[in-house]
Every structure is written in structure tokens, then in C-alpha cells.
């Protein structure tokens, strides 16, 4: 999974407005069509795609706003259970539809001890902003340059890999394909590589 340094910087006026929507509409607030909510969502998406280099925070595979592997705004602590954190930028990262969806994360409870202040809560999951991912998860033989086989090196690392299915055959195979593709294309001339990337991006 990705290690993220800073969450989106949402303009104060937008943040104030979405907080008001949250107070009014509670669990319905995320699907509100209010301008402030739409604007908040677009700031989160633009920031997330940029700092995450269009990769899913959990499985690290490439995503895009449209196409086969679409980008979702993932509430790290699920908004269904932690409604109060619906519009908290530090609770949001960009994930692929597979990791964010019902088959993997869905409404998975990721918090063991919620606190009034988000950052003081205890999490079950490795938190992409609040934790250093490298203290919890690593790739086997990564020193040789193979970021494919993943393993947990802390209790939360193990929990995250298991619950987020990061070591599943499906995701491991996709990671291997990604790695092999990157390695094989290194030998291509810049122009050829650009053409290939454009062709691939159209289908991912
Ligand atoms: Zn993913």
C-alpha cells in the first residue's frame, strides 16, 4: 500500500459548507448534490490522483477516473459507521473500485478505539497518512527489486494484508504483471514507450 504524506487541502469555505451539510443531512450528506459537496469531492479526487500517481492506496495498481479500474474516494474509517468523519480529508484516499468495493473493504470497520479527535483514534488498519507503511508491510525480496510478494511485519500490517486481500492470488498476479511490464518496457525507446503507454492507458 502507499505511504501518503499529506491529505488534500480543502478551501476553508468549502470545508465549512460541507460540515453544515453533514449536520443537516447526516448519513445522506455524501450523496448530496450541494455545490460544496461536489467541490469537496473534486478537490479530494484531483489531489489524490496527483499525489498517488493514479495508483490505488491499497493495492497500488494503476487507476483512472474512467475505464476498467475506476478511482473511488475511499473513507478509511467507513462513513456508514463513522459519519462524523465523512468530510475529513485525512480520512479520504483514492482507491480502485475493487479494493473500495463490497468484495474487499466495503463497510469493513477499520477502527479499534475511536476518539473525539480523529488522529487520536486507534486503527486496526495501517493508516496511509498517520502511519509509516514501511513499519508494517514489506515486499519479500524487494532488495532484489521484486515488489510482488507482500508480507505483514506488524499486527496491523498482517491485519491489513488479510482484510484488504493484498496477498490474494488475483492482486499478486496483477502486481507481478505490472512489474514485468515496467521491466520489459525499460528497453524501449522513449517514443515507443509513450505509444505503448497511451495504448495501455486506454484499456486500463
Ligand atoms: Zn486497489
Image (cartoon, helix red, strand yellow):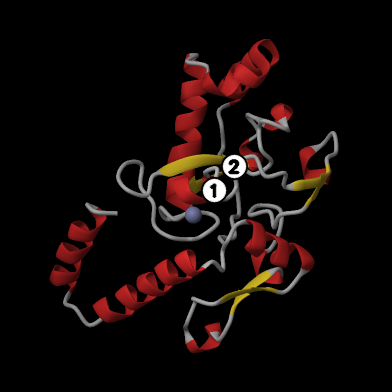
Q: Tell me if label 2 and label 1 are in contact, CB under 8 Å.
A: yes
Q: Residue furthest top?
A: 24
For image coordinates 56% across by 60% down, the residue present is: 2
Q: Is mark 2 within 8 Å of ligand 1?
A: no
For image coordinates 46% across by 65% down, the residue present is: 170
Separation (CA) of disc 2 from disc 1: 7 Å
Residue 116 sits above or below residue 161 on the image = above
Picture coordinates of residue 63, whole percent (x, y): 39, 51
For image coordinates 67% across by 44% down, the residue present is: 108
Residue located beneath label 1 in the image: 103
Circle 2 residues within 10 Å: few <14, some 14–19, many ≥20: some
| Quadrant of res 14 | top right
Picture coordinates of residue 135, whole percent (x, y): 71, 70
- Mark nearest the camera among 2 and 1 is 1
| Quadrant of res 186 | bottom left
Picture coordinates of residue 76, whole percent (x, y): 64, 44
Residue 181 sits above or below residue 108 on the image = below
Circle 1 residues within 10 Å: few <14, some 14–19, many ≥20: few
Is residue 188 rendered to the left or right of residue 156? left
Q: Which mark is residue 45?
A: none
Residue 68 sits above or below residue 84 on the image = below
Residue located beneath label 2 in the image: 106
Nearer to the camera, 136 or 47 = 136
Amino acid at each position: 500500500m502507499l505511504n501518503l504524506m499529506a491529505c488534500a487541502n480543502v478551501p476553508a469555505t468549502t470545508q465549512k459548507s460541507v460540515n453544515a451539510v453533514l449536520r443537516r443531512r447526516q448519513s445522506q450528506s455524501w450523496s448530496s448534490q450541494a455545490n460544496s459537496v461536489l467541490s469537496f469531492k473534486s478537490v479530494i479526487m484531483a489531489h489524490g490522483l496527483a499525489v498517488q500517481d493514479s495508483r490505488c492506496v491499497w493495492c497500488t495498481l494503476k487507476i483512472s477516473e474512467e475505464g476498467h479500474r475506476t478511482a473511488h474516494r475511499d473513507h478509511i474509517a467507513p462513513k456508514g459507521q463513522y459519519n462524523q468523519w465523512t468530510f475529513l480529508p485525512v480520512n479520504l484516499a483514492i482507491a480502485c473500485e475493487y479494493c473500495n468495493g463490497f468484495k474487499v473493504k466495503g463497510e469493513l470497520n477499520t477502527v479499534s478505539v475511536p476518539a473525539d479527535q480523529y488522529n487520536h483514534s486507534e486503527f486496526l488498519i495501517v493508516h496511509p497518512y498517520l502511519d509509516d507503511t514501511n513499519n508494517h508491510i514489506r515486499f519479500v525480496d524487494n532488495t532484489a527489486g521484486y515488489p510482488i510478494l507482500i508480507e505483514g511485519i506488524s499486527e496491523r500490517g498482517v491485519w491489513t494484508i488479510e482484510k484488504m486481500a493484498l496477498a490474494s492470488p488475483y492482486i499478486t498476479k496483477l502486481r507481478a504483471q505490472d512489474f514485468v511490464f515496467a521491466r520489459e518496457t525499460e528497453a524501449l525507446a522513449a517514443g515507443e514507450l509513450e505509444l505503448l503507454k497511451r495504448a495501455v492507458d486506454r484499456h486500463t
